[in-house]
Image (cartoon, rainbow, N blue to C red):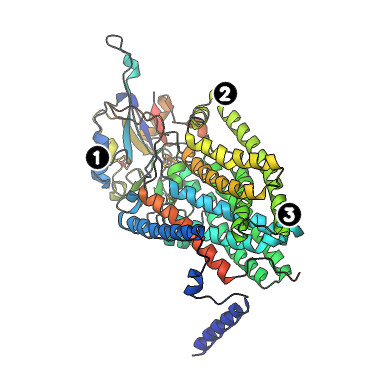
């Protein structure tokens, strides 16, 4: 029983997309699938040479926010979407009827249709792959060359992520919606 | 052995009960035997064509799955959802119109009760036929909707209540046929209440989308009931127009004039609501609401909805103070086209605004609005739904006496 969360030191992201590759490899996401499970948002540099705004150029790695109060779970008619014992929002592909309501309700556009199971899927914090094998890291975190991601148990006050969140300023995406994301962007 | 006997007993009882429902014995030849006017021939041809489309469309879907549709990750709901809503709104509307006479006891409207209730059954069946090919796993839905019901899901309530509603509508219709007005009234009232609950829940499916500011809120659940009533009245004109070939007897004319006046009021209320919805959406420039609303005002389907679905029929009613029932027959046909756009707009506009933040790759500008165009398969299944609706209704007119019984 844990309450998994992830902190992203997003300013360190260099947009190498190693995380996208690692996630696809680990979780069998179809090759070439765009923005499935994980993606890096890119803000183009603004201005005309030589007056370029360096601060405008930024990368925002993102994935399912693992909301504590998840709209996708709330709208699911068959409880196919559920919170597992570690607080991870998961989809039971046997129960998903592909009504797509969750895809419309998720404020972060984090869900997609998995062409293999023909049901909706999303980032699972590698629950059925790495965590199931007893590992304590996710593929995207493990591979990141600049160590953007820190993954761990939010309920454990001694965990690296808990300490990070206590010592660094951070924000959540679309916090006004009350979804209580478990992804934290460090500033 | 004993079980087999009871089973047979039940089958016999059901058969005996069905035999008590007044109906005409018809054969295929009766169905093909209609006055061969050009209009009738044209409608028959169109229906056959639509049914063929349905078969092709469904075949295509079964082979290719959702790939055959124009839906995308950013725009997961497409034309079929809009058409489903179109049909169930029609059903709820006809149920309201049918209830005027046999539930609420407005004598003038009893002449349409049976026909409207039958229409409500036919339209919802057509809606189900279409949605079955949009929901990825309809059979699984029936199982898990019961085993692990998601009670906080508007889709769960909408689906479950519509299932119940269909049952009550069928029971009511049977009692209407059997001329058991007391029981018809009871089941009609329950059916109407369940139908209204189901229908407002369908509005809730959109109203609960907290992240889609353009749809979120109380507007859709209430507006769905209002537009259902409007749709029901349009369909009443269309059904009666075909029934009497636009030569209306006095009692029918009287009823239609009454309906036209109600329609005038309802359309006025709808236009008032829409205006305020747009104004409150635009006011203040809130992103995700104001920009979407301003964009909607520049799209032609919105103006099709306003012109065809509201303004033209409203002007027809206004000009003759509701007396021009033949004009309103045509106005209603136009109105139904507008109502179709109303449903399409509702679905599409909800998904217009891209949700991802900075989720763009290099050398690719962020999409201003999410794009969607229905695929040929979606269009074929949708037209097929219309074909099913016309066919079922036509069979019903042959099989049952849908006119009011004369003896009361
Ligand atoms: S980010 Fe979206 S998919 Fe993930 S838990 Fe929240 S609402 Fe669900
Ligand atoms: S698509 Fe599947 S997971 Fe999503 S709401 Fe529908 S049944 Fe639930
Ligand atoms: S946590 Fe696992 S499933 Fe989620 S984005 Fe990272 S690698 Fe993919």
- Pinpoint residue B53: horizontal percent, then vertical percent: 39, 57
For residue B284, the mark is: 2
Mark 2 — on which chain does it sit?
Answer: B
- Kindly state the secondary structure of the residue where label 1 is placed: helix
Relative to B260, say whether B140 is above or below.
Answer: below
Q: Name the residue under label 1.
A: A22
Separation of disc 1 and disc 2 at Cα?
44 Å
Q: Where is residue B93 shown, x and y percent of the image?
A: 62, 53
Q: Residue B246 carries which label?
A: none
Q: Few, some or many C-alpha atoms within 10 Å of disc 3 (few <14, some 14-19, many ≥20)?
A: some
- N-terminal of the two: label 2 or label 3? 3
Name the mark nearer the viewer: 2 or 3.
3
Secondary structure beneath disc 3?
helix
Mark 3 or 1: in front is 3
| Horizontal side, residue B378 vs residue A145: left or right | right
Where residue B322 sits in the image (x, y, percent)?
A: 70, 45
Asked if labels 2 and 3 share a chain, the reply is yes
Please report contact status of discs 3 and 1: CB closer than 8 Å, yes or no: no
In the rendered structure, the residue with mark 1 lies on which chain?
Answer: A
Q: Can you tell which of label 1 and label 2 is closer to the viewer?
A: 2
Residue carrying label 3? B254
């Amino acid at each position: 029983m844990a309450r998994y969360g992830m902190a992203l030191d997003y300013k360190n992201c260099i947009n190498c997309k190693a995380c996208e590759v690692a996630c696809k490899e680990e979780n069998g996401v179809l090759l070439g699938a765009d923005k499935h499970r994980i993606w890096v948002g890119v803000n183009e540099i603004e201005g005309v040479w030589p007056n370029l705004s360096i601060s405008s150029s930024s990368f925002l790695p993102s994935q399912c926010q693992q909301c504590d109060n998840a709209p996708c779970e709330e709208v699911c008619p068959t409880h196919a979407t559920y919170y597992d014992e570690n607080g991870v929002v998961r989809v039971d592909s046997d129960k998903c009827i592909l009504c797509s309501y969750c895809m419309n309700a998720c404020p972060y556009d984090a869900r997609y249709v998995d062409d293999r199971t023909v049901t909706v899927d999303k980032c699972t914090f590698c629950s059925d792959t790495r965590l199931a094998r007893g590992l304590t890291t996710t593929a995207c975190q493990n591979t990141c060359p600049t160590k953007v991601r820190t993954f761990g148990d939010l309920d454990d006050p001694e965990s690296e992520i808990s300490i990070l969140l206590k010592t660094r300023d951070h924000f959540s995406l679309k916090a006004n919606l009350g979804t209580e994301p478990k992804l934290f962007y460090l500033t | 052995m004993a079980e087999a006997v009871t089973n047979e007993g039940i089958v016999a009882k059901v058969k005996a009960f069905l035999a008590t429902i007044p109906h005409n014995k018809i054969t295929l030849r009766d169905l093909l035997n209609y006055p061969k006017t050009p209009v009738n021939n044209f409608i028959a041809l169109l229906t056959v064509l639509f049914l063929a489309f349905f078969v092709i469309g469904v075949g295509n879907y079964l082979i290719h799955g959702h790939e055959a549709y124009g839906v995308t990750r950013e725009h997961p709901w497409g034309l079929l959802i809009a058409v489903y809503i179109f049909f169930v709104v029609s059903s709820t509307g006809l149920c309201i119109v049918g209830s005027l006479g046999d539930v609420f006891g407005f004598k003038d409207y009893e002449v349409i009760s049976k026909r409207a209730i039958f229409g409500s059954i036919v339209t919802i069946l057509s809606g189900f036929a279409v949605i079955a090919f949009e929901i990825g796993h309809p059979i699984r839905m029936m199982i898990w909707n019961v085993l692990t019901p998601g009670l906080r899901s508007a889709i769960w309530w909408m689906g479950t209540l519509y299932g119940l509603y269909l049952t009550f509508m069928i029971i009511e219709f049977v009692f209407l046929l059997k001329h058991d007005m007391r029981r018809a009234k009871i089941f009609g009232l329950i059916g109407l209440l369940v139908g209204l609950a189901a229908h407002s829940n369908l509005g809730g499916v959109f109203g609960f989308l907290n992240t889609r500011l353009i749809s979120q809120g109380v507007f859709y659940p209430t507006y769905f009931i209002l537009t259902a009533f409007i749709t029901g009245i349009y369909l009443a004109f269309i059904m009666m127009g075909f029934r009497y070939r636009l030569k209306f007897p006095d009692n029918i004319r009287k009823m239609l004039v009454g309906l036209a006046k109600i329609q005038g009021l309802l359309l006025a209320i709808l236009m008032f609501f829409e205006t305020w919805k747009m104004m409150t959406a635009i006011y203040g420039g809130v992103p995700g609401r104001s920009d979407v609303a301003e964009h909607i005002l520049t799209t032609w389907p919105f103006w099709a909805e306003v012109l065809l679905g509201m303004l033209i029929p409203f002007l027809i009613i206004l000009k003759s103070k509701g007396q021009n029932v033949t004009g309103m027959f045509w106005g209603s046909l136009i109105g139904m086209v507008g109502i179709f756009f109303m449903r399409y707009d509702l679905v599409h506009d909800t998904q217009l605004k891209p949700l991802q933040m900075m989720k763009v790759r290099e050398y690719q500008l962020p999409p201003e609005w999410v794009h969607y165009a229905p695929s040929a398969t979606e269009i074929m299944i949708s037209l097929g739904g219309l074909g099913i609706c016309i066919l079922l209704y036509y069979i019903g007119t042959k099989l049952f006496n849908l006119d009011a019984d004369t003896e009361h």
